[in-house]
Amino acid sequence: MSELNDIVVESATRLFSDACTADLYDGLEGGGWPADLWRLATDTGLTSAIDTESDGGRCLPLDLLTALARAAGAKAAPIPIVETLLGQFALKAAGLAVPDGPLAFGPVLTTDVLALERRGADWLLSGDLHRIPWGRHVHAVVAVARCGQSHATVCIPRPTPSSLGQNYAGEPRDNFVFDAWPLAAASVGEEGRGLDADTLYFHAALWRSAQMAGAMQTALDLSLRYSMEREQFGRPIGKFQAVQQQMAMMASQVAAGAAAVEAAVAAAADGHQAGLAVAATKARVSEAAGHVVAISHQVHGAMGFTREHALHRSTRRLMAWRDEFGSEAEWSAWIGRTVAGIGGDQLWSFVTAAQDFPSANSFRLNHHA
């Protein structure tokens, strides 16, 4: 990482380490809002994807934003930091104003579709959005809707959820129903400009993978520490070969996930084979998450299942995040379809990057075609 990335990650890690206390997590189990934590993150500049010192306020580099996502995931920060950063990223790409406060984005599920219809100078939005992260608390939901034969980014200010839900970690995941919902022209981007729904989904998969990489590293660190503190038969359990083997397996999964994220960020930054790289990363990180959760709880034993121990803050999020924005099975199927579309005669050229293939380089989901 660059020196700037190191500074931002260090600042985020320090803030989340100090502010994310056991009392804070306990108070949020019912879907509450951590106002003090959000204010601290905002005052520190961690909730802004915009470089205000650049001409025109460009977005910060992708590697910096994903590094921040990983830091937030490592500390299980219970705020929509990734959702807000990616929402700002999408609004900026569409040329729309970025509102203050926390944001969410959608669709989260590929089966959700929004449609725009013009009414005079304004617009009407129709469709459903399911499992929107932190939906009840955000100041706006950023979404991509169909607009004729094209798409448009919309900013929906303070919509009311139709039903409330939560994920395994107790974080809000809410549903919205829009039936001819009126939107001012200033809240709708130019047709065809900015991210389409597929591209937003790929970015979300990449950024969520970065969060998961951070959470897996924390689970590994906690397990290593516990294995050297917990004694059995007169010595730390980490000295037993069976435990060492388990720890080595977990470390290899964490390393593989982190390497996949770094490779996908590099690919997405220059656009080369970005779609396939992101798909492979989310599939690999989701697979690794299952192994990390299982082994870390095996190492901790009964202690790891208690609410008092910090392990569950990471493992519960890993179990929730592994299926968000595409599960391991869904992305593996997408990769299979993409490789089949490339064809056997051209596959080696594609793998060795000798030439580009638009069907796999673009951020597209084949089943949306």
Image: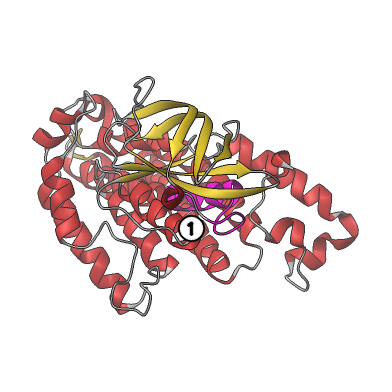
In the visual, does 333 lie left or right of 58? right
User: Seen from this angle, which residue lies furthest top?
Assistant: 163
Where residue 24 sits: x, y (%)? Answer: 12, 36
Residue depicted at 9% across the width and 34% down the height: 23
Which quadrant: the C terminus? Answer: top right
User: Which secondary structure dominates the residues rendered in magenta?
Assistant: helix
Callout 1 environment at 10 Å: few (<14), some (14 to 19), or many (20+)? many
- Element class at badge 1: helix
- In the image, residue 266 sits, relative to residue 310, either above or below, namely below
- In the image, residue 135 sits, relative to residue 2, either above or below, namely above
Residue depicted at 61% across the width and 48% down the height: 151
In the visual, does 311 lie left or right of 295? left
User: Seen from this angle, which residue lies furthest right?
Assistant: 345
Frontmost residue, 150 versus 67: 150
Residue range in magenta is: 190-210
Q: Is residue 115 magenta?
A: no
- Find disc 1 in the rendering and name its residue: 261
Report if residue 294 is visible in the image.
no
Where residue 94 sits: x, y (%)? Answer: 49, 59
Report if residue 187 is visible in the image.
yes
Frontmost residue, 307 versus 251: 307
- In the image, residue 304 sits, relative to residue 69, either above or below, namely above
In the visual, does 234 lie left or right of 209? left
Colouring method of the image: secondary structure
Frontmost residue, 174 versus 125: 125
Frontmost residue, 278 versus 257: 278
Residue depicted at 58% across the width and 46% down the height: 197
Which quadrant: the N terminus? Answer: bottom left
Number of disc labels: 1
The kind of residue tagged 1 is Val
Where residue 167 sits: x, y (%)? Answer: 36, 27
Where residue 309 sits: x, y (%)? Answer: 18, 33
